[in-house]
Image (cartoon, helix red, strand yellow):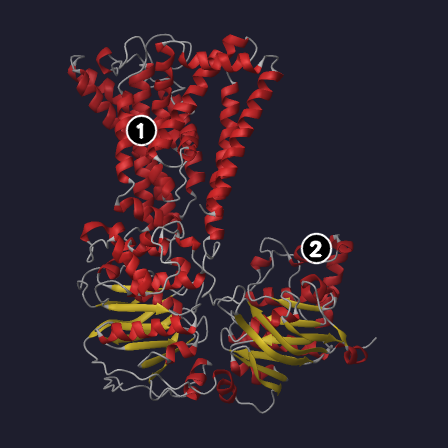
């Protein structure tokens, strides 16, 4: 284990400790016993099949977003546009499903709805991702900035859509679309829960990325992240890399948009993303860009949300929004780890801990020019 | 107090300075005297120890042996700040001004605390400007100034900090001829006020233009110290480079077809001199050396030849690529172009293991590669063949020392089972000890004997002359000399490197080289 690895584990451990300390402090501050709170948390996650199902349902969108971010993050392309891509994917999927309904007169089989929804969602999310990719390739617009700002554009588009061309014909308290046709809904995987077939999709994607890790493309992206000139020799040009990686994450987010509409809410809502675009980024980093790690991290995030509800009902005083605070602390911690990884790799790379100095004749300071 | 009164007690003298970095001797027994009111030029090849000497004077490094005196009293600055307080300041080659801030604000950043208000800082700078007879805009962000004015601004800030001895590290490297003239005029007027100036430069004609005293370093030793008067640039070049080492015996090689050819290359880069119509032809079995002072366009030329930079005019053709194929780095790689860049950090991936680095082409391009995936035992054998220490395939490349990373790079680019069609190498032996460097030279010669077309660039002239059959000398983005190794005398190359070309003697266009 190198010094770099050791320090990374120390950093990770301190993040975990910080999260526990903050959580305990918040519970005490809210006037509750931390032990009772933890008990409520565990019950909120596991006391009934329905609750276990909720954890799984919550993990699906975060997991897909995080998994499909693997190529971009591996290449050092920091896209934070999943929120907006989910929205556009959801709008496209909803519109496509209603289009199929009107064309077939409501007689379409489920499989057709699912296929069209999946494709439309992918196309919507992918298109939304190609815009910042184009800006980054053509004019070197920072992709963090452009994807972040496009999220606002997408949110505005969603609000407008739900009040105009996809608005529900019924009087509703909040803007929303009409309910999707019964056949378009993703069937439940576990009876008595909201856990739907999207779970299988997560597993498929995770396995695919697990196999992809040893592929030529994966190697090219790793090289691109730190050695762009060498990557050019491998055929990984800047434009090809940015377009392909952002397209993958955009398609993933678009599919999530479809799943949230067809599998969870059964209609398009203003709150379709529920913040999973951002949590997905956190989960991807928390999972160390490894498929198994990401699946576990997604389950952890989802369990935290579900458990916080249990905590609220057990203690009576701790609001369930404690989950968001804890996620926030975790996110900052993960960002620190990621920042450390990026800088440490750069700083340590030239001559990190030379194992053999015996034949190192390079002056430490003289450098190239004098 | 007038300048002349101060001068007598301001002589900076270094006696027998030596500096080693670990086992490496950067400077050995160097003495010099820096006189107030004089420009002291410091010249030498890359790696000759100029920067090390400057850093010792400026307190950035401390000597391993030897001593310095200032005004007759012992001078052993603990750090850069101590040297500054004593009046000795260094202006680095990469200017340290913050681009977003004006000169006044920059001065507030580095100046003494008591001056931490803008008005008095501005007053002091204005006074300094007047004293030095320099006009530089004080209140615009320094990034909006010309390079020459930034340079002057940096000098003015140093003077305002109380410097009486200025060390300028290649101040003219990024200036045009007119700007250089202007800078020198200002340096002379500073000298007239009693300032001592140590001028590090690569351009030997500048020595004649501006220097009073001259120190020439070669391989860390002082080979000339005294008046600069009466020395011709060609004489200085001879002092710098020394007599050519006897070229190692060369095996007969058959010079064959043209493998790599470029015509009329024009390209620009922020890091190097723009290429201005460069032609180069490299034949199978031939080793072409590219010499020149750093920043003469060699780096950009290799980038264009490697397919990394597309020229704005001109063509690059590599045998084995389809006539219509784009001249991209990946096309050239697949056609068998080996690549060792000047910065090895561009080519070695620190987060990958030695084995992964070694096999990156086959793993990242997949089965379509010319070379199959090497097996684990082959990887270990290749690491050992190139003396990579330790030869552990599963070690991360970041765990290797710099020299061993260079060997790893050579093992990947020069050690594959198939002979590369062409080799582009910039300083392939940099950071290597003599034995390892010799092994790389022998490997390059062996590849040429097997039919590869080899290009070796380096700012270490010995590295080029030790292996090349033909030497191209670059200056300011052009090839100013094309010499067969037999014609490549120190004097000719030295003159060409300094841009002193009348009509450079060129090699026979159809070289019938008996090497």
User: In this image, B211 relative to B444: left or right?
Assistant: right
**Do the residues indicated by labels 1 and 2 lie within the same chain of the protein?**
no
Q: Closest to the observer: B242 or A9?
A: A9
Q: Quadrant of residue A298?
A: top left
The spot of residue B444 in percent (x, y) is 30, 72
The spot of residue A133 in percent (x, y) is 35, 42
The chain to which mark 1 is attached is A
Please tell me whether mark 1 sits on a helix, a strand or a loop. helix
Which label was assigned to residue B108?
Answer: 2
The spot of residue A343 in percent (x, y) is 49, 47
Residue situated furthest bottom in the rendering: B230
The spot of residue A226 in percent (x, y) is 40, 50
Q: Residue at x 49, y 31 (%)?
A: A331
The chain to which mark 2 is attached is B
Q: Residue at x 37, y 69 (%)?
A: B428
User: In this image, B343 relative to A185: left or right?
Assistant: right
Quarter of the picture holding the N terminus of chain B: bottom right
Q: Can residue B93 be seen in the rendering of this structure?
A: yes
Which label was assigned to residue B381?
Answer: none
Q: Residue at x 61, y 82 (%)?
A: B211
Q: Closest to the observer: A119 or B80?
A: B80
Between the residue at mark 1 and the residue at mark 2, the CA separation in whole angstroms equals 52 Å
User: In this image, A85 relative to A40: left or right?
Assistant: left
Please tell me whether mark 2 sits on a helix, a strand or a loop. helix
Does B248 appear above or below A230? Answer: below
Q: Residue at x 29, y 23 (%)?
A: A258
Q: Quadrant of residue B106?
A: bottom right
Q: Closest to the observer: B329 or A150?
A: B329
The residue to which callout 1 is attached is A254
Q: Can residue B171 be seen in the rendering of this structure?
A: no
User: In this image, B263 relative to B481: left or right?
Assistant: left
């Amino acid at each position: 284990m190198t010094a770099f690895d050791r320090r990374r584990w120390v950093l990770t451990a301190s993040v975990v400790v910080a999260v526990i300390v903050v959580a305990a402090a918040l519970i005490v501050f809210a006037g509750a016993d931390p032990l009772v709170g933890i008990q409520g948390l565990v019950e909120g996650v596991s006391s009934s099949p329905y609750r276990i199902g909720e954890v799984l349902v919550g993990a699906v969108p975060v997991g897909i977003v995080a998994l499909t971010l693997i190529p971009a993050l591996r290449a050092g392309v920091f896209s934070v546009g999943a929120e907006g891509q989910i929205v556009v994917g959801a709008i496209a999927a909803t519109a496509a499903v209603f289009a199929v309904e009107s064309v077939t007169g409501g007689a379409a089989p489920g499989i057709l709805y699912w296929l069209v929804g999946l494709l439309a969602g992918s196309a919507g999310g992918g298109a939304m991702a190609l815009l910042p990719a184009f800006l980054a390739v053509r004019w070197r617009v920072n992709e963090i900035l452009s994807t972040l700002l496009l999220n606002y554009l997408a949110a505005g588009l969603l609000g407008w859509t739900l009040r105009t061309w996809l608005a529900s014909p019924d009087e509703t308290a909040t803007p929303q679309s009409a309910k999707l046709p019964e056949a378009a809904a993703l069937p439940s995987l576990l009876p008595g829960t909201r856990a739907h077939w999207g779970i299988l999709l997560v597993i498929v994607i995770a396995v695919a990325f697990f196999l992809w890790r040893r592929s030529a493309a994966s190697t090219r992206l790793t090289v691109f992240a730190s050695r762009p000139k060498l990557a050019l020799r491998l055929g990984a040009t800047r434009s090809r890399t940015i377009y392909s990686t952002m397209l993958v994450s955009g398609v993933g987010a678009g599919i999530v948009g479809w799943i949230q509409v067809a599998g969870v809410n059964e209609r398009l809502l203003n709150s379709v993303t529920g913040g999973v675009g951002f949590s997905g980024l956190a989960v991807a980093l928390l999972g160390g860009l490894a498929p198994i790690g990401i699946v576990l991290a997604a389950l952890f995030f989802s369990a935290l949300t579900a458990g916080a509800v249990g905590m609220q009902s057990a203690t009576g005083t701790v609001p369930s929004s404690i989950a968001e605070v804890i996620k926030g602390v975790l996110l900052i911690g993960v960002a620190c780890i990621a920042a450390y990884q990026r800088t440490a790799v750069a700083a340590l790379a030239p001559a990190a801990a030379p194992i053999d100095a015996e034949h190192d004749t390079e002056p430490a300071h003289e450098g190239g020019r004098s | 107090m007038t300048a002349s009164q101060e001068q007598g007690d301001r002589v900076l003298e270094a006696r027998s300075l030596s500096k080693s970095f670990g086992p490496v001797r950067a400077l050995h027994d160097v003495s010099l005297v820096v006189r107030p009111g004089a420009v002291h030029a410091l010249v030498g090849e890359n790696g000759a120890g100029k920067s090390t000497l400057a850093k010792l004077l400026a307190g950035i490094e401390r000597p391993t042996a030897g001593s310095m005196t200032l005004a007759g009293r012992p001078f052993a600055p603990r750090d850069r700040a101590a040297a500054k307080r004593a009046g000795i300041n260094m202006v680095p080659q990469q200017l340290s001004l913050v681009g977003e801030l004006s000169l006044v604000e920059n001065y507030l950043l580095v100046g003494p605390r008591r001056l931490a208000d803008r008005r008095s800082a501005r007053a002091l700078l204005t006074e300094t400007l007047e004293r030095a007879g320099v006009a530089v805009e004080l209140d615009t962000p320094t990034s909006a100034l010309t390079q020459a004015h930034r340079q002057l601004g940096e000098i003015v800030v140093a003077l305002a900090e109380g410097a009486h001895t200025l060390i300028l590290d290649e101040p003219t490297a990024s200036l045009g001829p007119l700007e250089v003239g202007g800078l020198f005029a200002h340096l002379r007027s500073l000298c007239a006020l009693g300032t001592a100036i140590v001028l590090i430069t690569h351009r030997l004609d500048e020595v004649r233009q501006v220097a009073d005293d001259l120190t020439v370093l070669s391989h860390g030793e002082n080979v000339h110290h005294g008046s600069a008067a009466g020395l011709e640039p060609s004489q200085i070049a001879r002092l710098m480079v020394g007599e050519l080492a006897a070229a190692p015996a060369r095996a007969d090689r058959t010079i064959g077809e043209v493998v790599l050819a470029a015509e009329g290359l024009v390209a620009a880069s922020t890091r190097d001199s723009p290429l201005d119509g460069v032609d180069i032809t490299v034949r199978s079995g031939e080793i072409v050396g590219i010499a020149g002072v750093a920043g003469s366009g060699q780096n950009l030329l290799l980038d264009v030849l490697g397919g990394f930079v597309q020229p704005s005019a001109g063509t690059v053709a590599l045998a084995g690529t389809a006539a219509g194929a784009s001249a991209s780095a990946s096309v050239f790689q697949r056609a068998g172009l080996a690549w060792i860049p000047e910065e090895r950090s561009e080519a070695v991936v620190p987060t990958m293991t030695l084995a992964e680095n070694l096999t990156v082409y086959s793993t990242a391009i997949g089965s379509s590669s010319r070379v199959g995936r090497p097996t684990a035992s082959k990887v270990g054998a290749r690491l050992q063949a190139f003396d990579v220490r330790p030869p552990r395939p599963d070690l991360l490349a970041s765990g290797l020392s710099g020299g061993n990373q260079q060997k790893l790079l050579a093992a990947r680019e020069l050690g594959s089972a198939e002979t590369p069609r062409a080799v582009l190498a910039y300083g392939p032996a940099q950071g290597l000890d003599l034995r390892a460097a010799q092994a790389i030279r022998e490997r390059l010669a062996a590849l040429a004997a097997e039919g590869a077309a080899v290009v070796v660039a380096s700012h270490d002239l010995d590295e080029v002359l030790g292996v090349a059959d033909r030497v191209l000398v670059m200056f300011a983005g052009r090839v100013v000399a094309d010499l067969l190794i037999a014609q490549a005398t120190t004097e000719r190359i030295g003159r060409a490197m300094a841009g002193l070309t009348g009509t450079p003697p060129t090699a026979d266009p159809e070289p019938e080289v008996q090497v």
